Amino acid sequence: MNLPLFIARRIYHDEDDRHQVSRPAIRIATIGVAIGLAVMILTVSVVLGFKHSIRDKVVGFGSHIQVMSLLSVNSVDSYPICIDDSTMKALDSIPGVRNVQRYTLAQGILKTDEDFLGVVFKGIGPEYDLDYLKQHIVEGKIPVFSDSTASSKLLVSRLMADKLKLKAGDRIYAYFISNDDVRIRRYTVEGIYQTNMTRFDEIICYTDLYTACKLNGWFEGQCSGAELLVSNFEQLDETYAHVIDKVHHRTDRYHSTFSSQTIYDAYPQIFNWLELLDINVWIILGLMICLAGITMVSGLLIIILERTSMIGVLKALGSRNSTIRHTFLWFSAFIIGRGLLLGDILGIGLAMLQQYTGLIKLDPQTYYVSEAPMEINFAIILTLNIATLIISISVLIIPSFFISHIHPAKSMRYE
């Protein structure tokens, strides 16, 4: 039989009313561990939810990997590259690639009778994955995009619609200026989307691929590039390595050189900003573990002082210091275990409440999301529980040596 575990269990379940000092200390220690763990769970859930929400929004506009002309890399201008059927099949056969979709960028001006706005027309074809746009349609519908005919249908953002006072079904003129030539097109606003990503919403509207290519005056098969969606984001680097082997430094029929970049390369500022959030997470985790450790140390010392006479009796009966120390460490483990259970219930409960109700609202112009995002990762929560338990027990080892200074004869005065 494990004697320290047996004694610790008896002490923990002792409800004797004479112990008026240790019970509040035990409750405070339990609450401290519970609050610390709950805060850690909420912090990790918010940061994970926020990072993945922003990442998904950026990917929705730019995909995971972009294949383009070498001249377009690190350039604000869009240079054509030929993405024909054979190239599409070659890209689609790359391991890890889920979808290949062509796109063309054209700069223009949307004008109403009262105002105008400079925008980027993104031409997309029938193979384009519209799942992301469908999630953010707030008015009207998504047009049927074509790569062979002009539809004169337009999908604009809520920011554009508000600035130009547009609604679904309205007609608007678009002006395209190139080489001292001005071309005018009349579009119908088929739908309005809203993602709250200001840097994209304020400039990108969608039209069909055929129209965008014609406006740029490009030859058959040419476009700005191809966007590749991967099956597993965690294997993005591995998939990108296959893309590099397949397309880099190869030329098309018009002698343009292929190149590529990942979403990290295309928008480094956004992802660097998201990585800074990890620093805040580690700071909060450290503070909460310190909170749990301090409350446990103070609680253990109070319990040892209260149980001084019991310690003296155990020593008089022949118990070694290590046996008594293990007894109080087991006792502390029971307190920490209850605190972890309460912390899990509180933290996961609040996270799920926010996840399903969206009670906490945010300013989308500042945070890019309209409510605090939550992502519950049970693997990370389990890791937090184990780490909190191990660290809390570890910081109690040194205070437990206070037991070795208690002598059986002197402990009698605590009766």
Image (cartoon, rainbow, N blue to C red):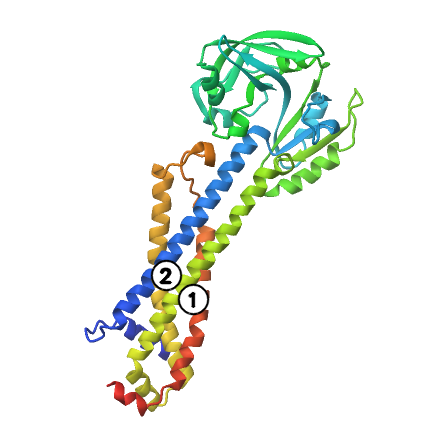
Point out which mark residue 33 bears. 2
Question: Which image quarter holds the N terminus?
Answer: bottom left
Q: Is residue 247 left or right of residue 294?
A: right
Q: Is residue 412 left or right of residue 110?
A: left
In terms of image quadrants, where is residue 19?
bottom left
Secondary structure at badge 1 equals helix
Name the spot of residue 306 as percent of width and height, x first.
Answer: 28, 78
Give the Cα separation between the discs numbered 1 and 2.
Answer: 9 Å
In the image, is residue 17 above or below residue 119?
below
Q: What residue is shown at x 79% (from left), y 20% (from top)?
A: 253
Three-letter code, disc 1 = Ser
- Residue 150 is situated, as x and y percent measured from the top left of the image, at 60, 9
Q: Residues within 10 Å of mark 1 (few under 14, many from 20)?
A: many
Q: Residue furthest right?
A: 255
Residue at 34% over, 66% down: 335
Q: Give the residue pinned by disc 1.
A: 392
Q: Is residue 127 left or right of residue 79?
A: left
Q: Which comes sooner in the sequence, label 1 or label 2?
A: 2
